[in-house]
Amino acid sequence: MPIFDNQGSYDTEMAVGYAGMEADTSGPRDVASRIIETAAVAFGLAVGRGTADGSAKLSGGGFEGITIEDKTRTADQYAVGEVAAVKRKGSVWVVADGAVIPAGTVTYTEATGAIGVKAVATGIVAIPNAKFETTAADGALVRVYLG
């Protein structure tokens, strides 16, 4: 329930997280640096391998990882040519693309980087050794573990 005063309204509870926020930094983790290739990538999206060594992009081949937040970026995304932090192991918050449950297979849509439980098909890739740690409705935050 928000609090109202003459300055505006404020939430009484802190948000549990936000897209691209590392959910657990005390456990196993692996974060790689990748240069963003063809289009800006928002925090909390899956990226694939780029064409150049050490690069990543939306619609890239395979699964490279999930972009994590960088407090020095003002637009909550990495621009083309910037070095992005890409999480390859550990827990991270993302926005669910469809309703998800912990037992669901974690997939991502190559064109958008959105993470959900869609059926594997052309352009929809299963993320190996990944699992949802929480339940979420479409468009809500969900914790994903990359193993």
Image (cartoon, rainbow, N blue to C red):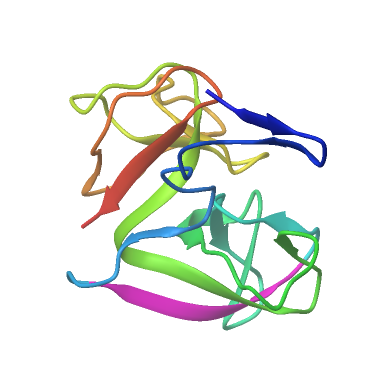
Q: Residue at x 57, y 82 (%)?
A: 54
Q: How many marks?
A: 0
Left or right: 139, with 14 as reference point: right
Magenta stretch encompasses residue 66 = no
Please identify the quarter of the rendering in which residue 79 is found: bottom right
55 up-or-down from 112: above or below: below
Dividing the picture into quadrants, the one containing residue 118 is top left
Q: Residue 99 at what x, y percent from top left?
A: 42, 16
Give the overall secondary structure of the magenta segment.
strand
Quadrant of the image occupied by residue 71: bottom right
Answer left or right for 97 relative to 35.
Answer: left
Which of 145 and 136 lies nearest the eye of the viewer? Answer: 136
In x, y percent, where is residue 69? 57, 65
Quarter placement of the C terminus: bottom left
> Magenta residues?
29-37
Pick the front one: 17 or 103: 17
Above or below for 78 versus 33: above
Q: Residue visible at 40% across and 76% down?
A: 31
Residue 36 on the magenta segment: yes
Which percent across, then down, holds residue 23?
34, 56
Using the image, determine if residue 104 lies above or below residue 40. Answer: above
Nearest the eye: 104 or 52: 104
| Rendered location of residue 42, percent (x, y) | 68, 54
